[in-house]
Image (cartoon, rainbow, N blue to C red):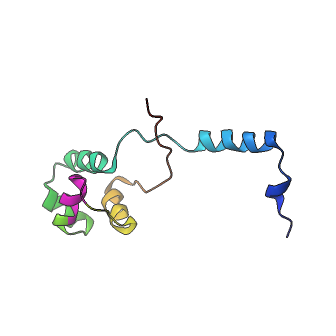
Amino acid sequence: MKRVHRALSKQEVEALREKLSSMVPTATADIPEVLRTMRMITRKSQTEYARLCGVAPRVLADIEAGKGAATLKTLRKLLKPFGATIGVVSEPAEL
């Protein structure tokens, strides 16, 4: 199998970087904020939304409070009612 990546010119690499930048949106909100907003749109309490998604209420409360680290499986469950999923985003530039 030919290793193409070593044969790329600087211009080709730069073109790929630009393509990647156009494909990957910039993050404008953090996960706790997104989940809290989604939950409020559904007009459900943390307990109700957690049960709807199949996660423990305490887990949702911790995520919304910015505590701990949620697993990808849990985040997928919490995003599912909105047809959303986890993806790659770039960090916004710091000022």
Instruction: Work out whether residue 39 or residue 69 is closer to the camera in this orientation and state it.
Output: 69
Q: What secondary structure characterizes most of the magenta part? A: helix
Q: Where is residue 27 drawn, in percent x and y?
A: 43, 42
Q: Is residue 84 left or right of residue 1?
A: left
Q: Where is residue 83 drawn, in percent x and y?
A: 39, 54
State which quadrant residue 15 falls in.
top right
Q: Where is residue 37 drawn, in percent x and y?
A: 25, 45
Q: Is residue 17 above or below residue 6?
A: above
Q: Where is residue 30 drawn, in percent x and y?
A: 34, 46
Q: Is residue 5 left or right of residue 29?
A: right
Dividing the image into 4 quarters, which one contains the C terminus? top left
Instruction: Work out whether residue 27 or residue 95 is closer to the camera in this orientation and state it.
Output: 95
Instruction: Work out whether residue 24 or residue 80 is closer to the camera in this orientation and state it.
Output: 24
Q: Residue at x 15, y 57 (%)?
A: 46
State which quadrant residue 47 falls in.
bottom left
Over which residues does the magenta segment extend? 59-67
Dividing the image into 4 quarters, which one contains the N terminus? bottom right
* Membership of 79 in magenta stretch: no
Q: Is residue 30 above or below residue 52?
A: above
Residue situated furthest top in the rendering: 95
* Membership of 63 in magenta stretch: yes
Q: Residue at x 59, y 44 (%)?
A: 23
